[in-house]
Amino acid sequence: MKRAYIETYGCQMNTADSELMHGILAESGYVATETAEDADVILVNTCAIRDHAEQRVIGRVGQLQEQRRRGALIGVTGCMAQRMGESLLGRAGGVDLVMGPDSYRQLPEKLAALGALESRPTLLTLPQMTPAPARGGLTVLGFDPHENYEGVAAKRASAVSAWVPIQRGCNYRCTYCIVPYVRGDEKNRDPRAILDEVRALAEQGVPEVVLLGQTVNSYEHGDWNFPRLLKEVARTDGIRRVRFTSPHPNDFTRELVEVMATEPEVCEQLHLPVQSGSNRTLKRMLRRYTVEEYMEKVEWVREAIPGIALSTDVIVAFPGETEEEYEKTLRLMRDVRFDEAYMYRYSPRDGTPATRLPAEQFIPEAEGQERLLRLINMQRQIMLEVNQSWVGRTVEVLVEKEGRRGGVQGRTETNKTVNLEGTPDLIGSFVDVTLTSTTGATFNAEVVGALV
């Protein structure tokens, strides 16, 4: 029996890709394990958005060398693999396989070629401190303009909510972003295949789907656009909640707002990355919209869906960002009052246009970190105030999993995390609860009734 373990870093697309890899490996007889220690093959599926994410992976590969000494294969897949390529083979003690996001169908073939799938008892007889074996590593990094993994049955981690990629790659070229260089140009799936996948999920009893794309609302295929696809997904029998991430403000239209407002299954939640509150910075990021245009779109959606929960992404300390421009970002955050925000300090990515800006424009690390901490502290206070306003309301929660500290955990339609008393048989159920308190990030609640 061949055993595989996949550890995932980064965005939701990486999570979906890990599910694809598990599905591909399962078709070749692999069994998924819960820990690296039990696996013959260990895959680290990586992110390349920020240097910190890559350093975490290098550290993790070093930790996994004990398993490699015992005979397990170590592979690095995903965006970091595509970006760093063959140089990863000798990092942190050694890597056997480096594979980019368009090559996962080749996983079983390449693992077989590496030929280290002996039985586990034999592997465990190796002395613990024996140097990791010198093997001829493989790199598989080609782009495939047609690879959308149609026909691959993903092995999903959740029976409650399913990631459904509708698009791979990106045609935008934001000056700070590595994604187009490691995932290639935008590739949109056939809508019929997407709808078939959603119908199959509904038949399996999965009540929620999340449509995924790098700029998900730029989706086009023939005479289909994203609003049309979203409407059809929302009208699939058996699907009770539909989400999507991450849209680009440039492609956020009134047509999309209308679908969100009129289709009951589309959740009252929107993640709309803003990145900066300064028009000059947005232009230098090549974001293709202004602050005024972004705020207009926020107004559209709040007018159409008054209870909508908004979240965003923000980058501070982009090269050349002045203190005044940074203050404009703080002002935008105070004006919009996002329910949640993902906030980062600019991280240079080799090969992206922003790294070629004049050296004197790069903001010292300490100053950039100070800007980030000020933003985080302000947003935490906003989030606390927003969530406190929800305490006392009765809302519907989709129970997703057991809680870390007992009970169960789920999410509201507006994507707020809720902990409540209950047993695992509630998982997959829709439950009415009253929100009793908040930590600022999550809620505690009491059940007032269960829905069929």
Image: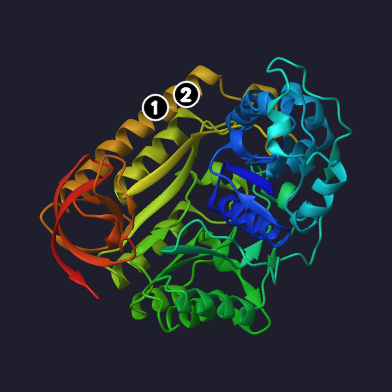
Whether 124 is drawn above or below 281: the answer is above
Q: Nearer the viewer, residue 316 or 389?
A: 389
Give the side of residue 244 with respect to residue 62, left or right. left
For marks 2 and 1, give the CA distance.
6 Å
Residue at 49 percent across and 66 percent down: it is 252
Q: Dot 1 lies on which element?
A: helix
Q: Nearer the viewer, residue 47 or 175?
A: 47
Q: Which residue is mark 1?
A: 373
Give the side of residue 106 with respect to residue 72, left or right. right
Where does residue 67 sit, x and y in percent of width and height?
A: 67, 28
Residue 369 tag number? 2
User: Residue 302 falls in which quadrant of the image?
Assistant: bottom left
Give the side of residue 26 with respect to residue 207, left or right. right
Hey, what amino acid is under mark 1?
A: Leu
Looking at the image, do the residues carrying marks 2 and 1 touch, with CB atoms under 8 Å apart? yes
Q: Nearer the viewer, residue 64 or 178?
A: 64
